């Protein structure tokens, strides 16, 4: 073995206290990358229904892991090189040129890369099956294990981590190249400048945070919410860094100025070291805080969506099988056509062996409006930031028949059903709703047993159903949206997905080519939805998201832990001398322990407390965004968020206990 | 009664697995009276630092006894040690041992804060000391911003602000240039004039020549001592120098 290789190996061995966690990090990252990538590969091989969205998600997930690995390995590696500056300086003084040190570093990096990659892929392959099981279970896909070793994933891991390590090496060499030997030798013991807080940064941080929270609390429109959420996230990240780096030092400076508060045995040592600690660690703690916030937000939103699938499907799918026919307006006005269509569809389902039951059916007309001059006016600008109002007109006779009622209405009267935010449209009976080109309707009562199909609640703009005497009258005056006929039924158990109405199937029952008086087809199109199939679809989508959320959160949490570990280690060594001095001056071991604990606790609590606060403030805006994904269950969101915070805090506390001990051990020696 | 009595002090280090034994102090005996300025000299490895650590209650002897104002250090419980050190002893180290996270002022306050003193009282105590040690102008600075001599003067201020029974100095001039050394030694002598008892370990003849009495340690025993008597520092310097020559030669000294 050449001298260089020997030095490289001994370099790794001698620095194992910091090298081991780095190895764990890089092996873990490579394993996670391999697992996510190979899960995607196995889903591609299965080529199954509902798996395609998950494939895309996993692909995206692997990109996130790659990017994060780059950042994180860079960060942890910089700890390594910083601790080893002295060693390099010594080599240099012993007559080794920078070129030789570069060779040693290159060999070290190559060893690290090879070990990380091989172990990473080995562990990844080992655990891939377990993760596949978890993923399939979460996605509700009832299929067997199929994962096998993926050369594609292994090769892509080799490439991605090869690039990462090459960049790390380049950066390390750049750093070595720029420093001179004397400096290398001394770099660890250079006197440190006292922290000077920049009040401007602190104030800007507070303002940014307040601004971001204000946005999160006040945003109204879901469409705005996505964009503003992005802005708010950037503001919160910037503010977190500013406040942790500058705000905390500023805080210490303010406390120091209060002499009678500061000069107390319990605070004196803690406050002054805290200022230094925050100056050095502010950025690291801010990173931890942001990672934790990401974990909390990711888990909260993915778990909420996942838990809400059933709820959401129930509210948008009144029955097991749901059909809607987009009709020629003449189909509504022609006597008996709608009835014939409905009977045909039911008969087709019967003969397919589905035994349709709980049948409901109604004709309806949907329009989207904006308020103008005290009237509702039709609009097609869905993305408009102006408040929009949705109206759905339903024929009274259909309603009575489907829901077993016997209301009577005169022309110009309407029963109203509130889909969402109806209070913005009407106050109660007696109100008149005036819609341009369609007419005005006096509300005579409210019903609450209507089951709308395809109408989304939670769009945040108001949506109401108006049940009126006869919709054929308004079909004529209105030409923009097609009148629609809805037919829905449940099936015999086990037959849920057996009936599949496509445009030209079941032509014995429905004459798709039948034309109306105007020579146009009666049926322009159909929309067919099956509750069971849709549930599977959504479970696969949101299950995939949740799975990925859990994977990424795991990685982020481990990252946070490792950052803390590195902090404790590096600080332990620096603080050791300091505590030695204090002991000589008369600080007892008990007082040292107390002071260490006070600082550790502050360092520990700050990121998780700030992360919890960010999450709480993110809730309103998150709720608006989730609404667009048909999520409308605020209680669930709150419960999930709170339990995520609690679980995260618990894990974090356990890890803190472990690492704080290792810190104290170093200090005590 | 002497302020400090050291009797038959013995310290033997045993390696962890009980193999080799090193005798750092064999049989050390001496006393220090209140108001004295005593220098302890000896070569590297003669046991100076071990002796100082035992006097500072940082280390425990394997035999013999140290009495401070008649009280045996060994009778102190572990929980009392810190406060005992704080209340009775002041320390000055070669490497200053100032905390870089504190300003000079806060470094000096440290032992008083630990003793639970009020800010007003600390302030009042610091004033005369900072004037005498000429560090009033650097109180708000951090250790990295001031010179070695200033750091050591700050360390002296920290040591005497508690008005200790005895000031223990371990090679206080070891890291200073000659000008700063001169200045510091004058200040120590000055402080001694006001009645402060000082015990200084050093191997600088120049430093020792400012003391009232010089003890020589060799092979873990007090080998010899010289009293200043009426000598000037220059004369004492010559005497110490002669003694050291004899010690280096391994012979006996007669007086």
Image (cartoon, rainbow, N blue to C red):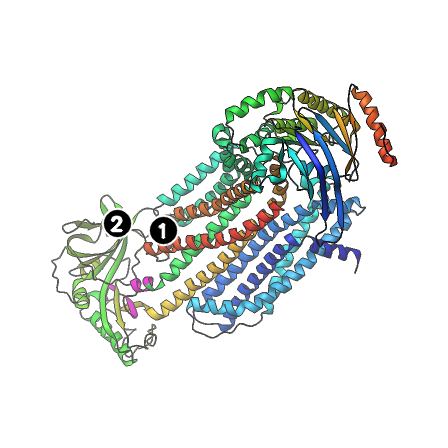
Nearest the eye: A188 or A537: A188
Q: Position of residue A470 (x, y in %)?
A: 16, 61
Q: Position of residue A205 (x, y in %)?
A: 47, 38
How many numbered tags mark residues here? 2
Q: Is residue A315 magenta?
A: yes
Q: Which residue is mark 1?
A: A624
Q: Is residue A323 magenta?
A: yes
Provide the residue span drawn in magenta. A311-331
Left or right of B245 on screen, residue A198:
left
For the N terminus of chain B, the quadrant is top right
Cα gap from disc 2 to disc 1, whole angstroms: 25 Å
User: Quick check: marks 2 and 1 in contact, CB under 8 Å?
Assistant: no
Compared to A193, does B194 lie above or below?
Answer: above
Q: Secondary structure at mark 1?
A: helix
Tag 1 or tag 2, which sits nearer the N-term? 2
Tell me which residue sits at (28%, 81%) in the image.
A351
Q: Position of residue B155 (x, y in %)?
A: 65, 29
Left or right of A444 on screen, residue B213:
right
Left or right of A640 on screen, residue B159:
right
Q: Secondary structure at mark 2?
A: strand
Q: Which quadrant holds residue B142?
A: top right
Compared to A248, does A407 lie above or below?
Answer: below
Which chain letter matches label 1?
A
Residue A377's tag is 2
Left or right of A447 on screen, residue A386:
right
Nearest the eye: A519 or A204: A204
Tell me which residue sits at (32%, 46%) in the image.
A386
Closer to the camera: disc 2 or disc 1? 1
Looking at the image, can residue B146 be seen?
no
């Amino acid at each position: 073995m050449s001298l260089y290789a020997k030095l490289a190996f001994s370099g790794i061995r001698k620095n194992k206290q910091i090298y081991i966690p780095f190895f764990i990090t890089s092996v873990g990252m490579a394993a996670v990358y391999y697992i996510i990538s190979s899960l995607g590969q196995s889903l591609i091989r299965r080529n199954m229904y509902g798996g395609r969205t998950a494939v895309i998600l996993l692909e995206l997930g692997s990109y996130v892991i790659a990017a994060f690995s780059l950042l994180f390995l860079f960060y942890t590696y910089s700890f390594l090189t910083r601790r080893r500056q002295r060693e390099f300086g010594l080599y240099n003084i012993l007559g080794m040129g920078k070129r030789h040190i570069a060779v040693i570093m290159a060999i070290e990096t190559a060893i690290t890369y090879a070990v990380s990659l091989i172990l990473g892929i080995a562990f990844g392959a080992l655990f891939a099956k377990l993760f596949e099981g978890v993923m399939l279970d979460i996605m509700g896909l009832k299929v067997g294990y199929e994962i096998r070793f993926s050369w594609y994933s292994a090769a892509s891991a080799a490439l991605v981590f090869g690039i990462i390590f090459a960049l790390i090496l380049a950066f390390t060499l750049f750093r070595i190249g720029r420093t001179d030997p004397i400096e290398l030798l001394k770099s660890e013991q250079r006197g440190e400048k006292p922290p000077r807080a920049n009040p401007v940064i602190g104030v800007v941080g507070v303002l940014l945070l307040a601004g971001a929270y204000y946005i999160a609390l006040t945003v109204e429109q879901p469409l705005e919410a996505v964009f503003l959420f992005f802005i708010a996230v950037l503001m919160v990240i910037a503010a977190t860094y500013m406040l942790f780096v500058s705000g905390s030092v500023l805080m210490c400076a303010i406390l120091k100025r209060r002499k009678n508060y500061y000069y107390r045995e319990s605070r004196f040592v803690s406050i002054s070291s805290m200022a230094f600690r925050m100056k050095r660690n502010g950025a690291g703690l801010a990173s931890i805080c942001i990672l934790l916030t990401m974990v909390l937000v990711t888990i909260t939103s993915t778990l909420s969506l996942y838990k809400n699938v059933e709820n959401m499907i129930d509210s948008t799918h009144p029955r097991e099988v749901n059909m809607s026919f987009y009709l020629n307006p003449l189909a509504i006005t022609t006597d008996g056509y709608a009835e014939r269509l409905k009977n045909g569809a039911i008969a087709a389902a019967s003969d397919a062996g589905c035994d349709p039951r709980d049948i409901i059916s109604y004709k309806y007309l949907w329009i989207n409006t904006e308020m103008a001059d005290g009237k509702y006016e039709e609009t097609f600008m869905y993305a408009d930031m102006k408040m929009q109002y949705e109206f759905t007109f339903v024929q009274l006779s259909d309603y009575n028949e489907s829901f077993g009622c016997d209301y009577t209405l005169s022309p110009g009267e309407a029963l109203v059903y509130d889909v969402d935010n109806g209070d913005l449209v009407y106050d109660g009976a007696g109100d008149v709703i005036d819609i341009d080109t369609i007419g005005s309707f006096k509300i005579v009562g409210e019903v609450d047993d209507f089951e709308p199909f395809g109408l989304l609640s939670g769009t945040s703009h108001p949506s109401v159903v108006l049940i009126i005497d006869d919709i054929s009258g308004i079909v004529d005056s209105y030409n923009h949206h097609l009148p629609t006929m809805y037919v829905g039924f449940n099936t015999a158990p086990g037959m849920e997905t057996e009936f599949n109405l496509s445009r030209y199937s079941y032509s014995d029952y429905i004459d798709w080519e039948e034309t109306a008086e105007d020579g146009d087809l009666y049926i322009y199109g159909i929309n067919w939805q099956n509750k069971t199939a849709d549930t599977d679809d959504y479970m696969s989508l949101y299950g995939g998201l949740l799975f990925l959320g859990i994977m990424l959160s795991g990685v982020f949490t481990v990252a946070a832990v490792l950052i803390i570990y590195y902090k404790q280690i590096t600080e332990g060594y620096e603080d050791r001398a300091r505590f030695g001095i204090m002991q000589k001056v008369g600080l007892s071991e008990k007082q040292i322990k107390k002071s260490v604990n006070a600082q550790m606790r502050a360092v520990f609590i700050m990121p998780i407390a700030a992360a919890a606060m960010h999450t709480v403030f993110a809730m309103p805006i998150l709720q608006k965004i989730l609404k667009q994904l048909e999520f409308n269950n605020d209680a669930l969101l709150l419960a999930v968020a709170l339990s995520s915070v609690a679980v995260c805090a618990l894990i974090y506390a356990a890890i803190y206990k472990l690492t704080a001990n290792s810190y104290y051990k170093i200090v005590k020696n | 009664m002497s302020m400090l009595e050291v009797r038959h002090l013995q310290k033997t280090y045993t390696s962890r697995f009980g193999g080799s034994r090193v005798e750092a102090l064999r049989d050390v005996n001496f006393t220090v009276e209140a108001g004295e300025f005593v220098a302890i000299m000896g070569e590297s490895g003669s046991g100076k630092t071990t002796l100082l650590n035992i006097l500072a209650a940082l280390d425990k002897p394997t035999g013999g006894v140290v009495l401070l104002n008649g009280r045996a250090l060994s009778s102190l419980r572990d929980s009392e040690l810190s406060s005992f050190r704080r209340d009775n002893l002041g320390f000055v180290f070669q490497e200053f041992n100032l905390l870089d996270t504190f300003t000079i002022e806060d470094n000096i306050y440290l032992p008083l804060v630990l003793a639970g003193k009020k800010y007003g009282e600390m302030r009042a105590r610091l004033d005369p000391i900072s004037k005498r040690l000429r560090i009033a102008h650097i109180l708000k600075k951090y250790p990295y911003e001031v010179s070695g001599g200033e750091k050591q003067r700050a360390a002296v201020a920290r040591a005497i602000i508690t008005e200790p029974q005895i000031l223990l100095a371990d090679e206080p001039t070891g890291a200073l240039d000659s000008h700063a050394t001169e200045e510091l030694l004058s200040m120590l002598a000055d402080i001694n004039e006001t009645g402060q008892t000082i015990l200084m370990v050093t191997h600088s003849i120049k430093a020792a020549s400012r003391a009232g009495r010089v003890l020589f340690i060799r092979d873990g025993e007090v080998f010899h001592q010289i009293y200043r008597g009426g000598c000037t520092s220059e004369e004492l310097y010559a005497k110490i120098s002669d003694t050291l020559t004899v010690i280096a030669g391994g012979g006996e000294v007669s007086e």
